[in-house]
Image (cartoon, helix red, strand yellow):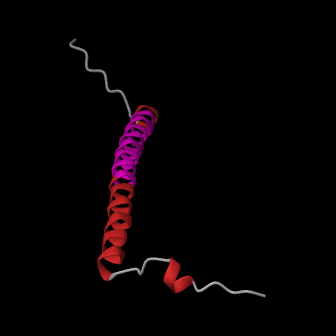
Amino acid sequence: MATADTSTTRERITRDDLEAKFRELEGGAREQVASARSTAITAGIIGLVILLLLAFLLGRRRGKLRSTVVEIRRV
């Protein structure tokens, strides 16, 4: 069983190589976070508008059912 000496055939990984790769990965992660944050904010705003519209319509309906109509006539 012959083993090849891999340290002589491969190039050494330097600190600069590691830092460059980490920066590349960090940049991609930041882009994904920014995109997800944008989507979450948009979804939150849409949900809030729907909730406010629903509360308005239900309150309006309840007000019509519970309100008394007073009619004033001149004699």
Give x and y (percent) for residue 13. Answer: 40, 80
Residue at x-position 34% and y-position 74%: 17
Residue at x-position 52% and y-position 78%: 9
Decide which of 45, 70 is in the foreground and name it. 45
Give x and y (percent) for residue 31. Answer: 34, 55
Decide which of 44, 28 is in the foreground and name it. 28
Above or below residue 73? Residue 17 is below
Decide which of 4, 54 is in the foreground and name it. 4
Q: Quadrant of the N terminus?
A: bottom right
Decide which of 19, 63 is in the foreground and name it. 19
Give x and y (percent) for residue 32. Answer: 39, 56
Residue 34 figure quarter: bottom left
Highlighted range, magenta: 35-62
Give x and y (percent) for residue 50. Answer: 41, 40
Residue at x-position 51% and y-position 85%: 7
Q: Residue furthest left?
A: 74
Would you say 44 lies left or right of 5 here? left
Above or below residue 53? Residue 39 is below
Q: Quadrant of the C terminus?
A: top left
Q: Main secondary structure of the magenta part?
A: helix
Residue at x-position 50% and y-position 83%: 8
The answer to if 54 sits in the magenta stretch is yes
Would you say 35 lies left or right of 72 here? right
Above or below residue 72? Residue 29 is below
Number of labels in the image equals 0
